[in-house]
Amino acid sequence: MKRWLGIIVFISVMCMFMSFGTPRARGGETPGVSTKEILIGSCSALEGPSSFLGTQTVTGAKAYFKAVNEEGGVHGRQLRLITYDDSYDPDKTQACFDHLMKDNVFALGFFVGTPTAVKYVPMAESKKVPLVGLFTGAKTLYEPLRHYVVNVRASYSDETRAQMEGVWNGLHYRRFGVIHTNDAFGATVLEGVQSALRSFSAEPVAVASYPRQTAEVDQAISTVRAAKPEAVVLVGPYNTLAAIVKKAHAQGWRPLFLTVSFVGTDQFIAEAGEDAEGAVITQVVPPYYLTDLRTVALYRRTMQKYFPSEKPNFVSFEGFVDAMVLVEGLKRAGRDLTRESLIQGIETIHDHDLGLGPELKLNYSAKSHKGFAHVIPTVVRGGRAVPVGDWKDVTPQ
């Protein structure tokens, strides 16, 4: 009798101990969800030459999660974010995804980059795991509709269209070049530029690529420069684009340089220094210093409270906004949380004011998982990206 009593006590203690660990699915229970916790997983560039993008995206998301948890969580559950590094390397995506599946996460979020995203998206779809908020605007994420993939930011097509329309109509430039990284990111932005120019019955006068994650850009610069473009769209992360503008200016070549939000605006400015002046960068969230906007002010307060050593920037702000969307979906999904109810909850978000201004309202549905379509063109002036008021004032420095 004593022996059986000891066994029963031992089993009870072990069950109690396990209940405090990582949530595990049992029977019909939802993976990654316990009575006290919701487990979210992320694969991002936490190391390597593009690490600023990954670490800052995750920092912004963690800041919002901390604020939500301090207020009681979502339906009484705390949010926990597990992060792994993929170094913005497509070859590391399977191992990173497998880590998260082994950890039995409920949902995924805060992934960075097109070359890695095109690997993760089919993985998430095959496992029927929601993936919310990716730091990329690749067309393949939006079309066709992917049931378990939820985008927040505007697409690269939205960004390149705003750029080409602004330069074509405002500056009356007609000669455009493109220098892009030779990967899926470069290809999708190039496609956006070409599509935007077709609306004007035009095409780039020169296109050149360079090896991804390198500064081997001399040949690309030479090729595009020879065509004498007035404006050049640069595609890549901050480290390579800083090298391009510095080398171009050193050679006396000063067209109007444009790029999309993925560049990591603040780190690009820091690395390029004075050579960043005059560059046009489209943004998918408002500048983080416009504190008259409710969510910008919230972001600044939250970052100061939980990550006081981190400087506010566009990248962490986007991670913060992505986390807001995920939390809104979790709230709408209700107490009886499932992966499907999260998707359904997000699909009920219509004309939702997130506190980012009247042009940035969330609209999801069962037929559209694209949150925003609006972009904010900015130009680097005095070491800061400032909104473009009149395209006529945007000229090379």
Image (cartoon, helix red, strand yellow):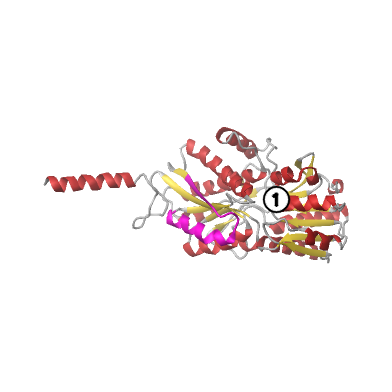
Residue in front for this viewpoint, 28 or 301: 301
- For this orientation, the residue located farthest to the left is 1
Residue in front for this viewpoint, 358 or 325: 325
Determine which quarter of the picture holds residue 356. Answer: top right
Q: Position of residue 211 (x, y in %)?
A: 70, 61
Q: Position of residue 121 (x, y in %)?
A: 55, 61
Residue 89 magenta-drawn?
Answer: yes
Which residue sits at x=68%, y=35%? 292
Q: Residues within 10 Å of mark 1 (few under 14, many from 20)?
A: many
Q: Is residue 60 above or below residue 186?
A: above
Q: Position of residue 300 (x, y in %)?
A: 62, 36
Q: Position of residue 317 (x, y in %)?
A: 63, 43
Over which residues does the magenta segment extend? 80-104
Query: Can residue 47 be seen here?
Result: yes
Residue in front for this viewpoint, 392 or 220: 220
Say which element carries label 1.
helix
Horizontal arrangement in the rendering, residue 325 relative to residue 279 (left or right) = left
- Count of numbered circles on the image: 1
The amino acid type, in three-letter code, at marker 1 is Asn
Label 1 belongs to which residue?
A: 239
Horizontal arrangement in the rendering, residue 269 relative to residue 56 (left or right) = right
Residue 231 magenta-drawn?
Answer: no
Query: Can residue 321 be seen here?
Result: no
